[in-house]
Structure formats: C-alpha cells, structure tokens
C-alpha cells in the first residue's frame, strides 16, 4: 500500500532551505514580459494564482541574462537591478500563500530565433538542424565573451536574490547555451572550453561556482539525461556531469532531456494501463541510476499525471521532488487536490493530431493560451479549441473577439516554440 503522505512531506535542501511539500511547478515559458523585458502585471497575477494552488516550489519560465540574446518574444530580461520593483512584485505574488519561488535563468545561444538574433552566438558556428530555418547560423564565442556570460548568470542571480526569490535554477537542458557547451555535436572547440568531456562541462561548472559565490539563496540546475541525438550528449556524459557537480553546492537538480532537434521532453502522456501509471515519468530510469552516484536532491519532471505515479517515484527514494508543468497550466489548483487526496490524477488533455512537428506547435500554443487566460484573470479553458489557440498566435485580434477580450491584451507573438 502506498504512503500517500510522502507528497506532503517537507524537504530540506543542501544549504538548509526547505520546501513545504514534494510537488514542484516546473518551468514553462510564460512570455508575459513587457516590451522592455520587465515582469508584467499579468505575470504577477499568474504566479499569485499558481502560488495559491498548493505546489511547494514554483520555478519560473526562463529569464534571459542578456538583452541581445532572447529565446522568445515576451521573455523577462535581467542584466542589472533597473526593474527591481517589478521583479519584487513578481516574487511577492508567487510567495504570498507559502510557496517557494525560484527564477530559472538562461541564455539561448544558437536557439534564438532569427527574427530576434540575426547572428546568435554559440560554442561553435554550427546551426540548429531540422527547424525549417527558424534559427540563423551562430557565430562562435570568443573566450573573453564566454567569461562575460558566466558573470551575466551571476549578476542575474544576484538581482533575483535582491528581488526576494528563494532560489535560481540554471537552465542547462533542452539545447540552450549551457546544453550546447555540453554536447560534442554543438561544441567542437579545441580550447579551454571544449575538446573533451571535461572541458565541455567547464562552462556549466564555472557558472555554478560564480552564482554560488554571489548569492546565499538556493541554486538549482536543469540538466538533460541525454540529448537523444546520435553522437551527442549521452547518458554516460550526463552522469559524469552530475558526479562533477556533486560537491559544488547545488541544492536541487532537475532531470529532463532532449533539444529543439529532438524534443523528447514535450510528448503528451495520458496513461491508461496500470503499468504506465506506476512508471509514467519519462526519465525515471535515469534518475534511479543517478541516485546511486550523487547525494544532491533530485527533481524529476516529464510525464507525471497521476498521484499514484508521483508517490511511487518518491517511495523508491531516487526522486526527492516531482515536477509538473502543463497540467498546472490548465488546472492551477491541481497540486492542492493531489496533496489532499481529493484528486487522483490530472484531467486528461488530448489535443495532438498525430503529426509530430505540427503537434509541437499546436500543443505549445494551446497551453500558452491557458497561461495567457490566467494572467488576464480568467479561468483556464480545458475545452478550448486547439484551432483557436493556434490562430491566436498569428491573428490575436480575431480570436480576442471570440473570447471578448480586448485585442490589446493579446499582443502578437512569434510562432510558438518549445517550452523551457
């Protein structure tokens, strides 16, 4: 018989901070920053709602450390403390009901759309394959520029601490810049920042050290179990990164996987068989191997839809925190109901068409529409047409008439990408 109290247990992290329960809201790209990269009132309202929903830890969508390198339109950007008041309002809203809030901080590297970065930067001048020309071929970074980016991460973390965030999470997964440095496919340097596995992980280790020396709040990492590309960052190298980081003072490591070129982390799951419910998480096998090698607490995200699946993952001892993202976008109070036992699973959402590349766009647009609604003070709409959500990205004025929302509340955004 399962011990359902496991979800409700507090967790003490490496440096003494605690989480009030074992459910985390993992990062989704909200794209609710204003035109200058500040948190908007809609973003504050969104996190007030999510913070009241019962989750112990809220991890924000990716905040960019460099104004010239954006992952998407609507990203929040932090280069200095100029927007401290707005950032403080964001943190306070998220924490108002007792949740902890961490800011995910990121540099997209070559995964910055060409309409935002005509010439992005990366470890090597190697473009992103299979994305229909969405990204321009990057320029290889100079060593001095790499060192400057390391310090940008530390600066952003310091401002997050000043604003009242409880922690930061370094985005080292999903093909963004840290992930690009780790992969032998995208990092083909032969200097102090590449050439073998040890030098490829130097960029990440230097970022961890710079942030850890700059702040007293929690520091986490999102890391790929693998990139799922032949010749790329694989499980063996990922395990080696974990071992190298185990003594570097991280409080929590979140495991994910995939890149824009091989997006394993965004598959929809609606488990029906009992065996699927018990092991519904995408990367659970990897985490079980990792637990034998490191002592740092582990957060597992990707695929969790049922209370039974979450409890089983915690019971095994490999997982310390379970993460959800999209289910909370459409049902903000789901964590509280899972904790109380009122709900046993997330409500199933079936919006896939079966066309893989199209589904990545449609699903991203549909969940983004739910985030937009909550940010505007509306309820999520589980029966929202996927067609309406898709069109909203490209013709928001027409769709806003259908929702009776002023067009100005739904600014035109770039085509939806993958979530953080």
Image (cartoon, rainbow, N blue to C red):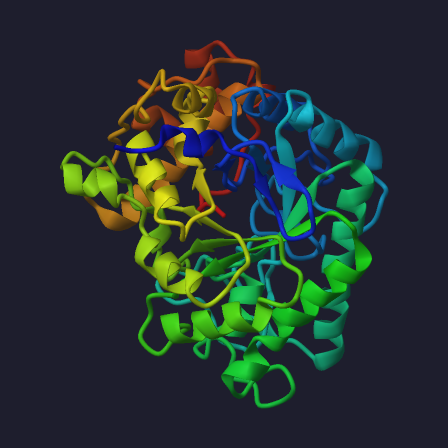
- Is residue 202 toward the left or the right of residue 267 in the image? right
Residue 257 rendering spot, x and y as whole percentages: 40, 58
Q: Which residue is drawn at the image coordinates 24% and 30% (left, top)?
A: 350
- Is residue 258 toward the left or the right of residue 372 in the image? left
414 or 211: nearer the viewer: 211
* Figure quadrant of the N terminus: top left
Residue 149 rendering spot, x and y as whole percentages: 72, 66
Q: Check the image and report above or below for 351 versus 251.
A: above
- Is residue 93 toward the left or the right of residue 349 in the image? right
Question: Can residue 216 be spotted in the picture?
Answer: yes
Q: Residue 237: name its quadrant.
A: bottom left
Q: Residue 82: name its quadrant.
A: top right
Q: Residue 18: name its quadrant.
A: top right
Residue 172 rendering spot, x and y as whole percentages: 54, 60
Q: Which residue is drawn at the image coordinates 69% and 46% (left, top)?
A: 16
Q: Check the image and report above or below for 249 versus 14.
A: below
Question: Can residue 362 be spotted in the picture?
Answer: no
Residue 332 rendering spot, x and y as whole percentages: 47, 22
Q: Which residue is drawn at the image coordinates 75% and 51% (left, top)?
A: 156
Task: Single out the residue that lies furthest toward the left.
Answer: 273
Q: Which residue is drawn at the image coordinates 31% and 28% (left, top)?
A: 386
């Amino acid at each position: 018989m399962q011990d359902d109290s496991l979800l409700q247990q507090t967790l003490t992290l490496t440096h003494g901070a605690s989480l009030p329960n074992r459910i985390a809201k993992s990062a989704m790209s909200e794209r609710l920053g204003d035109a200058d990269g500040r948190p908007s009132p809609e973003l504050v309202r969104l996190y007030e709602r999510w913070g009241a929903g019962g989750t112990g830890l809220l991890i924000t969508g990716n905040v960019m450390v460099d104004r010239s390198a954006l992952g998407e339109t609507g990203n929040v950007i932090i280069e200095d403390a100029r927007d401290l008041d707005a950032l403080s309002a964001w943190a306070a809203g998220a924490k108002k009901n007792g949740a902890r809030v961490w800011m995910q901080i990121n540099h997209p590297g070559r995964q910055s759309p060409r309409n935002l970065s005509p010439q992005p930067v990366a470890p090597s001048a190697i473009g992103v394959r299979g994305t229909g020309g969405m990204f321009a071929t990057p320029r290889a970074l100079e060593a001095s520029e790499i060192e400057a980016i390391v310090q940008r991460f530390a600066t952003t973390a310091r401002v997050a601490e000043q604003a009242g965030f409880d922690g930061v999470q370094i985005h080292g997964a999903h093909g963004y810049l840290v992930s690009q440095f780790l992969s032998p496919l995208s990092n083909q340097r032969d200097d102090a920042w590449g050439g073998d596995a040890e030098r490829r992980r130097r960029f990440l280790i230097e970022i961890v050290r710079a942030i850890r020396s700059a702040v007293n709040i929690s520091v986490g990492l999102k890391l790929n179990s693998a990139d799922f590309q032949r010749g790329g960052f694989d499980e063996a190298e990922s395990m080696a990164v974990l071992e190298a980081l185990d003594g570097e003072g991280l409080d929590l490591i979140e495991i994910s996987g995939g890149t824009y070129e091989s997006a394993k982390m965004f598959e929809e799951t609606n488990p029906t068989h009992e065996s699927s419910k018990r092991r519904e998480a995408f990367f659970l096998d990897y985490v079980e191997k990792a637990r034998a090698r490191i002592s740092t607490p582990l957060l597992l995200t990707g695929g969790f839809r049922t209370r039974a699946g979450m409890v089983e993952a915690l019971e095994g001892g490999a997982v310390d925190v379970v993460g959800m993202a999209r289910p909370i976008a459409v049902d903000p109070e789901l964590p509280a109901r899972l904790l109380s036992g009122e709900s046993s699973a997330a409500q199933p959402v079936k919006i896939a068409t079966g066309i893989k590349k199209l589904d990545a766009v449609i699903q991203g647009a549909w969940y983004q529409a739910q985030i937009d609604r909550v940010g505007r003070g509306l309820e999520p709409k589980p029966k929202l047409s996927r067609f309406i959500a898709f069109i909203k990205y490209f013709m928001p004025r027409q769709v806003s008439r259908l929702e009776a929302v002023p067009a100005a509340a739904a600014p035109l955004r770039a085509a939806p990408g993958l979530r953080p």
